[in-house]
Image (cartoon, rainbow, N blue to C red):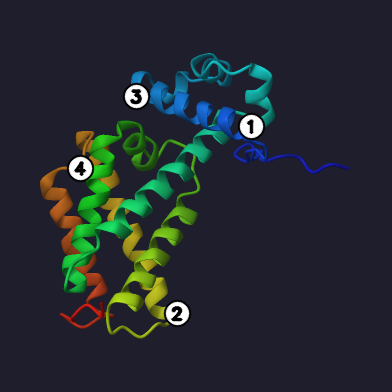
């Protein structure tokens, strides 16, 4: 027997043509999210927007949820890259704020990303995303500052991301954007929480 694919599990392409079509489908989905409610998007509509044969769309994705999950993963990778490149602060508090500012700027430039990641109604593996972000922050702290690696600190970094995600989701649901006030609240909550595990200051190790 062949295992049944999950509704959110995409079949990843292996060949060059497949990779091109796969990415065209994700690009098309991002454009559609910016123009219409996600609930109105279908796999056929995505294929038409991408100018990709429907059979190819169904080969890669069992349904729209799988496309959204793959698009979420791509957004996550882009956000992680932006965040890692932004954390040039001389103290961990400053570096953390710079990371958050980078994430906020990414959302502001990519409306579909903000809707997909911060809307609670849309399917995505948010727990996996928070763990990956938490791990990135943990690695940054250990590499850039005199911070001892520990399981407790790793867990704290994962919880930290969930705290910020909750505040930003609240802001998106109420204002359709991340407001200055709620951004500052997320930074305050994050730094105070992480401050229970880290010293108040600290110099960069680089």
Quadrant in which the N terminus is drawn:
top right
Contact (Cβ within 8 Å) of mark 3 with mark 4: no
Which of the 4 quarters of the picture holds residue 118? Answer: top left
Please rate how many residues cluster around mark 3, counting C-alpha atoms within 10 Å: few if below 14, some from 14 to 19, many from 20.
Answer: some
Q: Which residue is mark 4?
A: 178
- Going by the image, does 175 lie left or right of 33? left
| Residue at 57% across, 35% down | 66
Mark nearest the camera among 1 and 3 is 1
Q: Which residue is mark 3?
A: 34
- Counting from the top left corner in percent of width and height, residue 19 is at 59, 35
Mark nearest the camera among 1 and 2 is 1
Contact (Cβ within 8 Å) of mark 2 with mark 4: no
- Counting from the top left corner in percent of width and height, residue 158 is at 39, 65
- Mark 2 vs mark 4, CA separation in Å: 31 Å
Q: What secondary structure is marked by label 3?
A: helix
- Going by the image, does 38 lie left or right of 142? right
Mark nearest the camera among 1 and 4 is 1
Which of the 4 quarters of the picture holds residue 115? Answer: top left
The disc, 3 or 4, on the residue closer to the chain's N-terminal end is: 3
Mark nearest the camera among 3 and 4 is 3
Q: Which residue is mark 2?
A: 151
Q: Which residue is mark 1?
A: 18
- Mark 1 vs mark 4, CA separation in Å: 36 Å
| Residue at 24% across, 55% down | 100
Q: Is residue 61 visible?
A: no
- Name the one closer to the observer, 129 or 50: 50
| Residue at 44% across, 36% down | 122
The disc, 1 or 4, on the residue closer to the chain's N-terminal end is: 1
């Amino acid at each position: 027997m062949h295992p049944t694919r999950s509704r959110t599990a995409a079949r990843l392409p292996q060949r060059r043509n497949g990779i091109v079509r796969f990415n065209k489908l994700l690009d098309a989905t991002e454009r559609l999210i910016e123009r219409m409610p996600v609930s109105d998007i279908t796999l056929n509509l995505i294929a038409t927007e991408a100018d990709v044969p429907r059979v190819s769309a169904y080969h890669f994705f069992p349904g729209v949820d799988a496309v959204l999950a793959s698009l979420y993963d791509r957004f996550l990778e882009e956000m992680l890259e932006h965040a890692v490149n932004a954390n040039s602060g001389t103290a961990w508090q400053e570096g953390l704020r710079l990371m958050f500012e980078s994430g906020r700027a990414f959302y502001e430039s990519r409306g579909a990303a903000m809707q997909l990641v911060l809307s609670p109604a849309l399917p995505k593996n948010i727990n996996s995303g928070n763990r990956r972000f938490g791990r990135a922050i943990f690695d940054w702290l250990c590499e850039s500052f005199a911070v001892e690696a520990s399981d407790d600190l790793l867990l704290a970094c994962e919880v930290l991301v969930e705290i910020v995600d909750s505040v930003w989701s609240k802001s998106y649901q109420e204002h359709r954007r991340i407001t200055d006030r709620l951004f500052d609240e997320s930074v305050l909550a994050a730094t105070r929480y992480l401050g229970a595990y880290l010293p108040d200051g600290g110099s960069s190790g680089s």
